[in-house]
Each structure stands twice: as structure tokens, then as C-alpha cells.
Image (cartoon, rainbow, N blue to C red):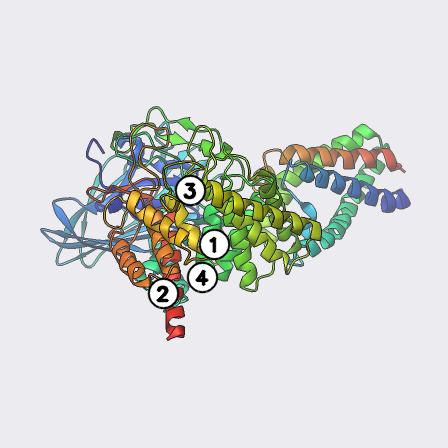
Amino acid sequence: MDWAGWALFGLIATTALTAAMIAAQLLGLTRLDLPLLLGTIVTRNPDRARAAGFFIHLGVGQGFALGYAFFFVLLDQATWWLGGLLGLLHSAVALTVLVPLLAGVHPRMASYRAGPASTAVLEPPGLLGLNYGTRTPLVTIAAHLIYGIALGVLLRPG
Amino acid sequence: MGSDPRPIEDYGLVGDTRTAALVAPDGAIDWMCIPRFDGEPVFGRLVGGPEAGTFRVGPAGRSTVAARRYRPGSATLETTWDTAGGRLTLTEGMVAEVAGRLLPPTLLVRRLTATGGPIDAVVEFDPRLGEPRRPPDRHVRGEALVCGWPGLAVGLHSAPHLAIEPGRPTTVRITPEQPLTIALAVADREPLVHVPPAAAWDALEADEERWRAWCLDVDDAVPQRDAVRRSLLTLRLLTYSPSGAPVAAPTTSLPEVLGGTRNWDYRYAWPRDASIGVAAFLGVGKYDEARRFMAWLLTATRLDRPRMPVLLTLFGKHPRAEHVLDRWPGYAGSVPVRAGNDAARQHQLDGYGWVLDAAWLLTRAGHGLYAETWRAMAGFADTVAARWPEPDAGIWEVRGAGAHHVHSKLMAWLALDRALRIAESHRTSRRRRRRWAAERDRLATDITTRGFDPARNTYTRTYGSADVDAALLVLPVLGVEPADSPRVRGTIDAVRRELTAGGPLLYRYPPGQDGLPGTEGAFLPCSFWLVQALAGTGRSGEAAALFDTLVGLSSPLGLYAEEMAPAGGRFLGNFPQALSHAALVQAALALRDAQQVTTRSE
């Protein structure tokens, strides 16, 4: 297991993923803002939330990188295309499971069942994050491909 | 519905802040979209014809409506009929608060009770989905009737149990000892949650208490408090809770003139309406609602900044292209019935003014803007500073070539003025402020020289036009010139004189001057803006009298459409209309403020 590689390259890959998502936002492709979504779990202020969310996302990304690293060890190979395939799978899980589930646990995110008493201000992402723009799934897939390919290239299988 | 449809003002609204239904006095739900305001109608008879579905619960034989009301301070609707056998009452509503409980996202509850003896009632349940008026796949699961379409299902429970068949009226005898309770649950891409009718009724009663508590907050000092509370409650019912988007109206294509073509889809959210809603809710101390509107604005406009879209879907997307539902006969034969709204593609300058004014009101009320919110607002101000010399479509969304609308320029002035005021307490570069100030001053000069007709002592509809525009009634509250200026008073008088539709009613512009065939009704929000204008220019007595008259023009249930026929007083346009209700609240607040100023000066 390439522990040093995991520690360093996990951070690099997550930073690249976050940068890709922010770039897509700035280009007007999606309203999905992962640092904001994660950071508003701990603070209501959007600017502070983005900073906090960035670090939370780094931690989450590091966790996923561990999974990638174990996978490479199991297959005894780490290549860009294998990383890309894992990235695709990862994005599918993120879009269909992780992001939609956020509405159930996030204290400041409304759900489809929100009523008048709800003080949550973040809209729910919906299936595939489509509430944040129709290009959200494509952006998410692209960002996770970058993440997976980065880990496939940088991590060593053993 | 035929050629003599039920008047729009006869309908009552029940809703849960996620979707809504319109209920006729005979107990028929003739309009309800699922799973959201902008979903497909499952009961669409209002504009889709008899084959588009209805859900009627009411007396089987001859009857007359004895009373119809909302239970005080609630969204629960009560209709009572006199029949040969006694009185029959239908009490109904949707459960708004379902979070944290195993209840379906939409739960409609209807209960029939009899007094004076047993009465025969009828249940006609005929759900059809969307434009094709598609009949459902029907199943009986235990005691529930389940009607399904791909991805969507509705489940009907009744107590006592009735064997209801979709599309076939079922007769039932209601006795004073045993009411009939029906619960309709909706499922969208999830399992149906079957709710026993008794539990559904309990949930509705608990909801009613919550609405009552919500209404208690409303300031006692506002005139016509009951009408204001009904308007606020209607505004809240029309606000989609999962995103905070205020839907303009829950209907599409209720016509602006019977048999006419001005039939638009209002199941979208206009940033302008959200901003007016911020002012209305702030004015009565409902800060959470005001902040939610601003939060929706912030997230919904994100992809388009610094341009602000004219209208958006409930989740801040661009609406689909406008298209005609060819097979739908429309309300009173008013075709086309449209879905989607192409006004979304227009450039409307006034929206920026409303939004920045709302941000200013929040700031003034002590709710400082987050840096991100201020960045968005400052971006809007930059857009206004750059684009105000261009023609636009104006607040009335007239289709065709743009024009230099004086109201739009005034609202652009407002946008820059409010941005400058907010900038005093929020970090802004000196250069940016200088630019906004310079453009604001240029705008003021431009408006006062090109948008004013000295011969008639009035601002005009567009530069060089001979027409006036009822939207100019907002002049006294802007501050572009003093409220007591002769030019402001002259404009108010010109609007009253030239756009009168009789009594308290006003046309928004000279009828028919919008490039479409035919004319339209009087535009109700304009009358409330007139109240505001009169109150703001020291004519409180006149304003109060006008306001009382307008409150008297509401539907029997206290609701307003967008327009009203000057002759006969029938409601026209989509219903109920959030803008009309927000304008009513603002008029009441202007009267309250004017009265407080008078009291202080005494």
C-alpha cells in the first residue's frame, strides 16, 4: 500500500476535482457548489462555509482516495484508465446516492417534503443534481474522471 | 365546462406550499398539478376540458351553497350546502407540514359531514395526467384505490370504505353520526405512503393550528387585517417550500379576456415577485419568509449573473420553450392554452430595481447582506449601469420590439440608488460607487427630460409616447423626486384619468396597446399601487376609501386574480395571483405607515 502516495496524491486529486467543479461554476455550467454544500453543515455564512467546506471536502476526498488505493492494490495495477473507470463509478455513486442523500441529513438543506416551518435555505439537489442545472451530471462526471485519472497516474499499486 | 364556465372567482385554493388545488363551489377540484406547482395536472378540467379530470365530493341531489369560507386564520376550506335532507359540509385542505413524519409529500384531505339528517353525496374521482389526459392504471391495494402512471401514483383512501371507480360517480349516504373522510396521497418516483383517513384528518387539524399561529404574528395596526392575513397566507401557500421560489400563480392560461389569446403560463417564479414578496413579508415582521425569498433569488440567479433572468422554474432553471397544448379547449374557449413562458427570453430592466430595493429593505431592517449576496447585488447594479440606455420589454412583458419604458428607467434608477445606499455599509470600491452615482444621475436627467410630458404634466409610458402607464404609480415610493412634487402628483392624476376602467379599477396601459388582438381586463395590482401612491402623497383618506373598495372586490374567499372585467366584475387571468396579493399587502402597509406619520405629527 502506497501510504505516502495516498496522503499526498489524495489531496492533489481532491484539489483538482474541487478546482474543476469551481471552474464549471464560474463558467455558468452548474450551480452545484460542493464546498458550500458541505460547509453550510457547520456555518450559515456562505463565505465561511466555502472555506470550511473546502477542508471538509479534502477530508472526504482523502477517504475516497483510500478506497481507490485499496482497489489498485487488489488489482495490482494503477493506470489512468483504471482510475478513470473508478472515477466514473464514483461520479455515478455521488450523483445517485451521495448528493441526493444530503437533503436528508443536511441541517440547512430543504427536502422535497419541506413545509412552511422549514427554515432551511439550500434547495435540494434532486436526482443527479439536476436542480442545480441540467449540465450538473456532466460536470460531476468530468470532475470525478479528473480525480480518478489523477489517482490512477500518481498512486502506485503496491 | 362548455361555453359558460364556472367563474374564476368562485374557486377556492387549497395548498401545501408544494402544490395547490382549485376547488369549485360544487366540491369539484378542477385544477391540481402533481407533484409540484409546475408539474402535470392530474385534475385539469379548468382549462383542459371534461376529459382532463376532476375530483368532486359534494351533494348528490339539488343543493345551494349556504356558506363558503376558510376556517379563520387557516388554509382549510369549508363549503356548506343546503339540501332537501339537511346541511352538508365539505371541509378540506392539504397537509403542509410533512417533514419528519411518514406522510406523503402531498396529502389532500376531504371530509363530508351532515347535519339535520342523512344526505346523499357523490364522489367523482377521475384523475387524468397531463396534456394527453392520460387515464391511470388502476389497482386496488387493500382498502386503497391506487391510480398510477409511469413514475407517478395517487392513492385514495376513504372511511367508511367506498368502492370508488375512476371516472364513475359513487353515491354515498352521509349521516350526522358518520362523516365521510377521504385522503388522497401522491407519490413521485417513490413508494406511496398509505395514510388512514382518520390519521390524515388529524394531520390536517394539526396543520390548521400551525397556520393559525403563523397568522397571529401579523401586525394589528394594518388596515383590513383579515384581508392582509388572507393575502399573506395565500402568498405563503404559493411559495414552493423546498426551494423558496414564489410561484406567480398555480394555473396556466386562464384568459385575460374571455375567449381571447392572452393566455399565459404563470407556474414559474419571477424575481420581481420575489422582491415584492420580500417587502410584503418584511413589512409585517415575517423575516424568515423575507430571507427565504432572497435566498432563492441568490441561488436561482447564479448561472445567469450578472444578468438577471425574467423568470425561472421553481428550482432556478430556465423554463422550457413556450408551446401550445393543441388538444386543450381552454377556459371558456380561450385558446391557445400555453405551457412554458417565452417572456423568459426578454430583457426587462425593471426587475433589477425590485431586487435591489428588496436587498436594501433587508439591509435597512438590520439584516446585513452576506458578502456573496452583496457581490451578486453589486453585479446586478453593474449590469444596470451598463445596460440602462438600451430599450427593454418592460414590466408588462409586451412581446415584439423593445422600447424605452419610463417605468423601466425609473426602476433602473432605483437599482443604482439602492446599490449606493447598501454600499455605505458593505465593502465596495470607490470607483464602482462613483460609476453607479454617475449613471444614476444620468438616468435621472434622461428620465426627467425624455420621459416627462410637460404639456400634460405627466410621465409617459415610453419616451416620446402619448400614453401613460399604471406602473408609474410606484413613483412616490422610489425617491427619484419628492413624493409631493407636482410632477409626481400630475402623473398619479393622469393615470387615474386616462387608464380608469371604472370605479377603483385601472388598466395597466391603454387597452389593446400591446400588439395582440383584442383587449384585456383591468389589472388589479395597479389599483393597489394607486392606494400606495395616494397614501404616499398625503392623500390617506382617499387611499383608505379606495383600499376598502378594493378589498370588497375580492372573491368571496378573499382571493384575487390578476385582472378583473370592468363590466360585470368577473375575474380574469391566472388565479390566485401572487402579485395582486403582494400589492394588497403593500397598500395596507403604506396606509399603516401614512396613518402612523399622521398620528405622530398630531
**Label 1's element?**
loop
Mark closest to the chain's N terminus, 4 or 1: 4
Estimate how packed mark 2 is, as few (under 14), some (14 to 19) or many (20 or more) residues with alpha carbons within 10 Å: many
Quadrant assignment for the C terminus of chain B: bottom left
**Label 4's element?**
helix
User: Residue B37: which disc?
Assistant: 3
Q: Residue B447: x and y, percent?
A: 49, 44
**Label 3's element?**
loop
Residue at mark 4 to residue at mark 3: CA–CA distance: 26 Å
Estimate how packed mark 3 is, as few (under 14), some (14 to 19) or many (20 or more) residues with alpha carbons within 10 Å: many
Residue at mark 2 to residue at mark 1: CA–CA distance: 27 Å
In the displayed structure image, the side of residue A4 where residue B245 appears, left or right? left
Q: Does residue A109 show up?
A: no
Give whichever of B418, A141 is nearer the camera: B418
Mark 4 lies on residue? B283
User: Residue B222: which disc?
Assistant: 2
User: Mark 4 or mark 3: which is in front?
Assistant: 4
Is B505 drawn above or below residue B422 in the view shown?
Answer: above
Give whichever of B583, B556 is nearer the camera: B583
Mark closest to the chain's N terminus, 2 or 1: 2
Question: Is label 4 on the same chain as label 3?
Answer: yes
Query: What is the three-letter code of the residue carrying label 1?
Result: Glu
Q: Residue B399: x and y, percent?
A: 43, 30
